[in-house]
Structures are given as structure tokens and as C-alpha cells.
Amino acid sequence: MDLRATRNPANGRVLVAVGGLLSGCGPRAEGAPTRRVGWTAGGREAVAESACRGFTSGGGIAGPTAGKGAAGGAPSSARARTAQESAPRRQPTRESAARTYARALPVVPVRARGLTIEGADGRRYLDCVSGGGALALGHNHPVVLEAIRKVLDSGAPLQVMDLTTPVEDAFVTELLHTLPPGLADHARVRFCGPSGTDPVAAAVELVRAATGRNRVITFTGTHHRAPAEECAGHGDACDSRRARLPYPQDRHCPFGVGGERGAELAAHWAESVIDDRRAGEQLPAGMILEPVHSEGGVLPAPDAWMRRMRRSTAERSVLLIADETETGVGRTGAFWAVEHGGVMPDVLVLSKAVGGSLPLAAVVHRDDLRTGEPGARTFRGNQLALAAGAATLAHVREHRLAEHAAVLGDRMLTRLRGLAEEFRCVGDVRGRGLMLGVELVAPDGARETPADGTDTGPAPGTAAAVQRECLRRGLIVDLAGPSGNVVRLLPPLIVTEEQTSAVLDRLADAVAVVDRSHGDQTPPHGARAVR
């Protein structure tokens, strides 16, 4: 294997350029030139020579890699590839039916780098799922791999629960560096289990212990209901009928008005629920919200609404929990999404990207909050995740990748809005930074109804068709929203403008194909009932 060392001028780190392997390609074919890798001032990968077979000038994929290099040129490699390609057929017979991505994305990843995934069949894909937002720096970023190898080579213990280690200390130090000044100066960090719901449950437990009250306010379409109801076994104290509120949005405003007026009505409703004291009901212990409702269909909360929720909760001594599980670490164009509106929460929920691609979760809270009894959390001391997380936080901060996400996100949003003007099946485009959503609708404004007669919302079948067409073009996208009719784009923060163009080209082609399939069944473009 041809290895050549180079130094990143932005941070002085030594990188190794492997012939074709650095970007997720297979072994370099005999006689092929080494792919030289440079770095931009922002620490992002810049390809000096696209010598990797199968890659287009836009960072895309031209198709399966051909030649000896792709298959390794050995029978054993061919047998391994055959075994890998048959994995999707074995999975349903070995694993439960509780599978999500594998149903819609029949890809067997065997190699990955940055934005790119290579499947067992040799095809390469642009990955705009990014592990559901967990891969802020994309796949196998050099600074993350370097941090992990450093821990492995040091002989340090890999799991120590909540014992203090140099690795944990470095992570906490870096995390505090990234927090807004008003919170960083008075913050405490609490580690918990590594899933997305673990820190939510820990935050709910924390606000209940701090206030002595039980009720927690959540919003429709979020994943917060189960942790809020199950935490500490409070049962009826978490009546979701009375503590679950509408999230402000334009297209599907529950009040039918949208815009500033819709957000104002949503805020007024929230305040009325907080103040509801019937039947001896106490004030809520806390309110938990997402700055961008990602799983609910990529719905950015208006900044004015966020500020009003902060003001309303503070005036009533209700603790505000901001869930940054998917929005944190630069994803929305600010390091933490609450910074867009200048909001300072009492509790911050962190997961996904904070672990640098490995499972890690934590809760950051004001130091004056009484946190209750210590809890046993076996997996909160994962040293590899702490190292990868610290490296990711530092890289995003030092290279201002949040600002990069804001700039590229605005450009992508502008181009995506063109799809809404061009194609009948695109009902709305929205997002913030590099968290973007394209809502698909039935071209005539009707709602798609499955064969069993249940009405699941506007155009989930159309969205699934777009996802399949994207996959055929070498683009992996996610679906979100209550009806699964929002195509969600979550490219890594290191994505380049050239790569975003390749992503949008493929998405536009996929939408065009699906839109044409409805062409004979739709009214003229100007006659649509829904937009």
C-alpha cells in the first residue's frame, strides 16, 4: 500500500494519504497515481487530484469501481465481497423486525470516508444521513481516528464508569469551551447512558428533583413523551393530554394561520397550560423543547417564540430544557441551536455528534440546581467516545465549521426552493444550517391513502419513491415527519460546496423522475390546491 505523509497547515496534524483509500475508495489499482489530499483553511478536505476511480469532479460517484483494484485482484477478496453482498438476505432471518434504515436502504457499507460510503457491491454513495446527525465530521475523519488510536495505544482503560480520567477531563474542558458564556460560567456536566433518550430521562429526573414538582411539558411530534412519562415512575403526573403542546410551524399550523401569528398563538397556549392550576395542579417542573424539530419534519422554531418560551418559563420558575441531541455541535449554523435566538436554557441535552461518531450522551445544567441522588450509569465512562467527542468539539470550534454550515446551508436552501417552484410534488422546503427538509405532497393537493384505508398524511409514498430514486443515483437520504413525507438532508459539516452541488443534482434528478410519474394525473401547475 502506498502511504504518503502530509501536514495539515490549519492545525499542524500529520495526515497519511493512502492511494485511493483516504476517501473511502478501494485499494489503488496497479499503476494508478496516488490521490493527493490537501486541506483548506477551515480544515476541510480538498482533493488535489481526483485519481480515485469512480469519482466525478463534483465529489460524486460515477458507478461501481472497475478493475483489479476494486476487487483486490484475489479470489479471497471476491469471496469476501460475495459474503458481504448476501448480508441483507440473511438479516431478516437473524434479526427482529424492529429495523428501520435497513428496510429502505439496502446498502452494506464496507468502507467510508467523509461524505462517501462504499458498499459491498463496489458502488459508492454520498451519505446525507450522517448517522442521523451523529457524524459531524463525516466518516472516519483523521482527527477522530487519531484521538481513538491515541487512547488505544496508551494502554488506558476503555471503560471506567464515572471515574475521572485524563480523557474525560479533556472532554469536559473542551465542552465547557464551546458553551455560551452565560451557561459555561455556571455549568455542571452530568454523564448518562449513551442513547438519545437517556439524557432526556436524566434531564427530566433532574428538573423534578430540583423543583420538587412532577409535571413536564413537551411538544407534539417529539420523542420526549416516553422518557418524560417513565422517568422516576411518576405515572399520572405526566398526563400527556394536558402537557403536550403544538409546536409552531407554518405549513401545518394547528391554528391555520402560520407565521408570526401562529407562533404567538402557540406561545399563548403554552402559557395557559403552564398556568393551569385546576384540581390542585402544581406548576410544571420543566418544559423540554427542540430548537429545530428534526424528526418531526425539520421544523425550525422561530427565534421570537424561543425567547418567549424562555421568558415565560423563567417568570414562573419553570426550568427550560433544550434538547440539542440532533441540533448541537454546529449542525444548524451555530455551535448550539439555542444561540440563534440568544436563549439560555437551564438544562442542555446532548447526544449524537457530541460523541464524535461513537455513543455518548450528557446533560449540562446550571450549577445551582439540586440534582438529587447519584445514579448508576454503567456506560457513561466510555473512553473512546470521550476522546472522539473532544476531538470533534475542538475541530468544529477551531475551524469555525458552524459558520461554514450556515453559509452552505443557506446556499442549499436557496437551490432547494427552486425545486418547490419547478415540481408539483414539492410542497415545502425548510431548514437551518445543514439540517434541511423537503416536504413531498400529492401533486393535486390530495392526501395519499394506503391500501388498508388508513390516512397517514400527505404523500409518504411519494417521499419513499424519491428516496429510492436518490439511492439509485448514489445518494443516501433520510425520511422524517409524522407521515414520513419529508426528505431530510444531514450532510457532515466538512462537506464542500462542490459536494453539495453533487448532492442537489442527484436529489433534483430523483424528484424530477417521481414528479413526471404523476404528470398524467395532475392538474396544470397553477391549479394546485396545496402549496
Image (cartoon, helix red, strand yellow):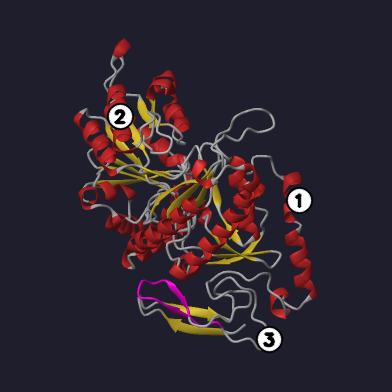
Image height of 97 relative to 498, above or below: above
Residue shown at 73% from the left, 45% from the top: 92
- In the image, which is nearer the foreground, mark 3 or mark 2? 2
Q: What residue type is labelled 1?
A: Arg
Residue closer to the observer: 150 or 261: 261
Could you say which disc has been placed on residue 24 in the image? Answer: none
- In the image, which is nearer the foreground, mark 2 or mark 1? 2
Q: How far apart are marks 2 and 1 (CA)?
A: 51 Å
Q: Where is residue 411 in the image (x, y as percent from the top left)?
A: 39, 61
Q: Where is residue 511 in the image (x, y as percent from the top left)?
A: 57, 53
The residue that disc 1 covers is: 90
Image height of 493 relative to 437, above or below: below
Q: How far apart are marks 3 and 1 (CA)?
A: 34 Å
The residue that disc 2 covers is: 265
Q: Residues within 10 Å of mark 3 (few under 14, many from 20)?
A: few
| Residue 471 position by quadrant | bottom right
Which numbered disc flags the more N-terminal residue, 3 or 1? 3
- Locate residue 80 relative to residue 517 in the image: left or right: right
Residue closer to the observer: 180 or 202: 180
Q: What stretch is highlighted in magenta?
A: 35-47
Could you say which disc has been placed on residue 30 in the image? Answer: 3
Q: How far apart are marks 3 and 2 (CA)?
A: 66 Å
Q: Say if mark 3 contacts mark 2, CB within 8 Å.
A: no
Q: What residue type is labelled 2?
A: Leu
Q: What residue type is labelled 3?
A: Glu
Q: Is residue 484 magenta?
A: no
Image height of 196 relative to 233, above or below: below
Q: Does the magenta stretch include residue 46?
A: yes
Residue closer to the observer: 389 or 318: 318
Image height of 144 relative to 69, above or below: above
